[in-house]
Amino acid sequence: MNRRFQIFAVGLWLLLLQCSSAAQQCRTSIPEAPVSSGDIHSLIQAIQDEIYANHLQADGYDAGVPAEKGSYQLQLYIQPAFNNQGLAWAIYKLMPYGEVLRMFWIGSDGTAFLYGRPEDRFPPSQPSYLTAYMDDAELLHAKQTWTKTSFALALNLSAPRRDQAIRRQRRRVAATSTVSSAEAAAARKDSRRAAQEANAEPDPTGGATHFFLDYGQPLPVWAIGASPIKTFGPFLKTLENGNPSKDVKVKIVIIR
């Protein structure tokens, strides 16, 4: 039975919190979408940019495998598919903090975004946290079943490459600066609770597969004349950027 719209009402707020004015940065994927080779390339670039921008590349040398002169490789494990909120997780060593389970998503322009900041040290209360807090069996299973690859880090990066990495990282930080760790973590908790409730209740939409956001704007052409099957909300948007504007009440309207 189709559960996606039962879960979506609360899950949408995780998306609204994490999607900023950079062209609605989060890519939703309903149903689950595989993590492509292009997504992996963007993820690796995001990981490298963050390390270079924070001058952490020397800290990971002893945890990696020496490669070409002045560089080394680190293992990377990637969840093979995004969930129905467009989110996935990856595991890698981010020294000097340790091995981290990192939540990420891909923006509409193909840019990868990493949740959390190294300076917060990835506590277990956040969606991105150190694997030291994971169950050993769960961690082993992830490493055995997720996509395995690696990425390289240069100890002495050229000035042009370093500047490019810093510029890209600044754009990512600016695009997600309106989201606090507490907000996103709370939204994720609400979303997971909604998913658990959805599994225990009948589908009120009868398997509907279309929805739109109603905040007083003209209806989408494909929705004109359709009778709503189910409406969720209203919810209050709290972000400054994007559409609708801040403090506007939004409903989620389900149609066939």
Image (cartoon, rainbow, N blue to C red):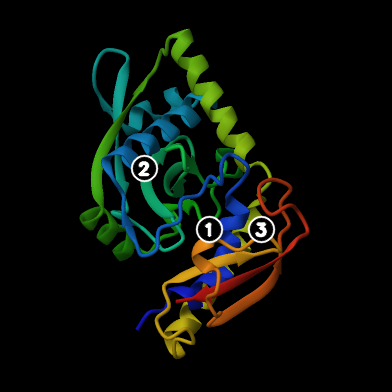
Q: CA distance from mark 3 to mark 2?
A: 25 Å
Question: Against 206, is 242 above or below?
Answer: above
Q: Quadrant of residue 151?
A: top left
Q: Position of residue 43 (x, y in %)?
A: 39, 38
Q: Residue at x 74, y 47 (%)?
A: 240
In this orientation, which residue lies closer to the viewer: 65 or 33? 33
Q: Which residue is mark 1?
A: 124
**Quadrant holding the N terminus:** bottom left
Disc 3: CA contacts within 10 A as few (<14), some (14-19) or many (>=20): some
Q: CA distance from mark 2 to mark 1?
A: 16 Å
Secondary-structure class at tag 2? strand
In the image, is 145 to the left or to the right of 26? left
Q: Which residue is mark 3?
A: 183
Q: Position of residue 125 (x, y in %)?
A: 57, 60
Q: Which residue is mark 2?
A: 92
Secondary-structure class at tag 3? helix
- Is any part of residue 55 visible from this angle? no
Disc 1: CA contacts within 10 A as few (<14), some (14-19) or many (>=20): few
Residue type indicated by callout 2: Tyr
Q: Quadrant of residue 149?
A: top left
Residue type indicated by callout 1: Pro
Q: Which label is found at residue 209?
A: none
Sequence-wise, the earlier of marks 2 and 1 is 2
Residue type indicated by callout 3: Glu
In the image, is 224 to the left or to the right of 207? right
